[in-house]
Image (tube, coloured by chain):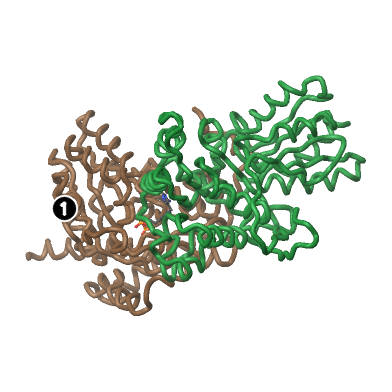
Chain colours: A green, B brown
Amino acid sequence: MPEAAVATRRLTIAEALREGIAEEMRRDPEVFLIGEDIGVEGGFGGAFGVYLGLPEEFGHERIIDTPISEKVIAGAAAGAAMLGMKPIADMQYSDFLFECMDELVNQAAKMRYMSGGKVSVPMVMRAPVGMTLRGAQHGQCPESYFIHVPGLKVVAPSDAYHAKGILKAAVRDPNPVLIFEHKLLYGSKGREAAGGMDLTAEVPEEDYTFPIGQAVIKRAGSDVTVVATHVSLYRALAAAETLTADGIECEVIDPLTLQPFDTETIFGSVRRTGRLVIVHEDTLTGGWGAEVAACVADECLDYLEAPIKRIATLDVPAPAAPVLEQRILPQEQTIVETIRRLVG
Amino acid sequence: MDAGAAHLQLETVQELYRKVALIRRFEDRVYRLFLEGEIPGTLHQYQGQEAVAAGVCSTLRIDDWITSTHRPHGHALAKGVNTSEAMAELYGKATGCCGGKGGSMHLGDPAVGMLPAIAIVAGGNTIVTGLGLAMKLRKSDQVAACFFGEGATNEGAFHEGLNFSAVEQLPIVWVCENNLYGASTPYGRVSLVPDVAERAKVYGIPSQIVDGMDAVAVREASAAAVEHARNGGGPTLLECKTYRFTGHSRSDARGYRTREEEQEWAKRDPLIVLAARLDEATVARLEAEVKAELDEAVEFARNSPDPDPATALEHVYA
Ligand SMILES: Cc1ncc(C[n+]2csc(CCOP(=O)(O)OP(=O)(O)O)c2C)c(N)n1
């Protein structure tokens, strides 16, 4: 977190991202934005309003409204990046990334390697994730598809301070970076889903970055390590509060980056607590939690006092009806009960 | 025109009015219920475009198929999805046409020839070629119609689907609803070719520009395209020029277009266009029928149970 002496204000994630993008565009004329409905006059400023106000400052030359052509969004970003520019591409919903898997997986991810290190692809792709009662094609959390691809970096910030810092680091990174943000965490609307917690954070006035590949311990504790992102992170923090009444102290970690994963921070924590719970909104099977569990089992088996537990969305597509959605999402109560059994 | 043909035509206009009114009043009610918190999720509404769905579907048989989009309410009602079950689906109820699993963006019912709507823009434009291919391989005389917006024509899927349907001469009617905007983006900003109909020609597909505010005109154009496809003549593209009266989705303030433009299109409201061909008493009777059907649908949806949470785990695999 920022030093006490630094001037800060509380921002939402949307505000912090907007500020971070504007700062990077001012700093480097090679940074540009590309996506659908991002800069149209009288429009939305992107599906979640992150770009509102930016066209007035930067104009339409650097804020490029594309046709509904995801292959072009990813392909043009990758191509411009291959010539050294620093595109920030926008996907309205992460579900639409499947429209441009070739550009991301076959092209952007592999170009450096195929060229023997001669070609860089310093692009950023932002994509919102999460279930919000919109059904099977507008509610996925596809982060885990991409951690499987060597050559891509994958980050998943959950608060304004880290969202801004990691976005700025991503723009300056010489590799393709995918940034997954949760729809319910952009503004104040997601408060309820996030357990009523304040979703704004102190953000310094001055320039800063937050390194890709570094996890953050959000709450220290000695009994169990809980690793979670996005809404699940806030549910884990709420569960940790509840569990203090049972005398259980949870150490809650926000990994922030899913590829390359900061295993050292997790290993260090598990060596202290002896227990690990991973919570994510992606479905269970093959989710990033499985990878973390495997790494910890590999390195920390002797320290483990209990089986590693994963709490995730059940292995079904997102349903539309509220009762069905609630049934499959990882709930705070499940986290509480799982940890009670683990520690008890 | 002899008396018999005139009578037939009058019946057709009444049928079309009834469908257009059903969709309009359904959508207006749904909007209110959504604002009142009875309907969860989000909405992409169809007011203004009803003549397209009503006109095209009036030329299809129940065993013909359609694919639809993120804006499917009108297509569903026009193809014959039960009004109460469509409403219940929007409520997320167990009795909905998809058991509450689909919701607004995935309305549909295979029993009446409508795949659950596909909310990925241009997603239906490749799937429909499979429907057409199955019909062709089985030598059936069915036809598939694919609804999509002008925004979809900039996806690769649009072009791949068109080309394949042409080379395989598939029994497909491509129905483009050109309502001028894809979300906030005016079509002129993302295509230098204002008429989608032009794009079909380069793939060797006959196409036609249709007044999408006039259900009778849509019906006539669609009837010819459907017959052509049914007789083995291959695909046709109909570009229906139309307008969505509402925002793109429920929270859209429509700052990207002018109120004057909206007023101009409102004069060509598909209900007004049809009502001009009917007498007042007929219109009143049809509206009363529609109202009764919708009262029943809302009651049905309200009184239906939520899905059993356990059903969340069903239907992933057979
Ligand atoms: C592949 C894909 N990209 C983007 C979206 C987000 N989106 C939903 S509707 C829409 C605009 C679609 O415009 P158009 O096809 O003309 O249909 P209309 O909304 O006008 O009915 C967009 C961009 C999506 N659902 N799928």
In the image, taking residue A191 as reference, residue B304 lies left or right, namely: left
Residue at screen point 71% across, 59% down: A201
Compared across the picture, whether B149 is left or right of A145 comes to: left
**Ligand 1 quadrant in view:** bottom left
Q: Position of residue B95 (x, y in %)?
A: 53, 47
Where's the C terminus of chain A, which quadrant?
top right
Q: Chain of mark 1?
A: B
Q: Indicate the position of residue A290 as horizontal and vertical percent values.
A: 65, 28
Q: Is residue B7 above or below residue B99?
A: below
Establish if B32 lies above or below B227.
Answer: below
Left or right: where A77 falls relative to B314 = left
Residue kind at label 1, given as amino acid type: Ser
Task: Work out which residue is located at the far front of the displayed protein and give it.
Answer: A118
Question: In which quadrant of the rendered view does residue A192 lie?
Answer: bottom right
Determine the residue positioned at 29% across, 46% down.
Answer: B158
Q: Residues within 10 Å of mark 1 (few under 14, many from 20)?
A: many
Compared with residue A309, is residue B63 higher up or lower down, i.e. above or below?
below
Image coordinates of residue B249 in percent, x first then y, are 46, 62
Of residues A89 and A134, the one drawn nearer to the viewer in this rendering:
A89
**Image quadrant assignment for residue A293:** top right
Q: Position of residue A54 (x, y in %)?
A: 49, 66
Q: Which residue is mark 1?
A: B207
Whether residue B117 appears in this view of the structure is: no
A58 relative to B158 in the view: left or right: right
For the residue pair B233 and B183, the one nearer the viewer reads as: B183
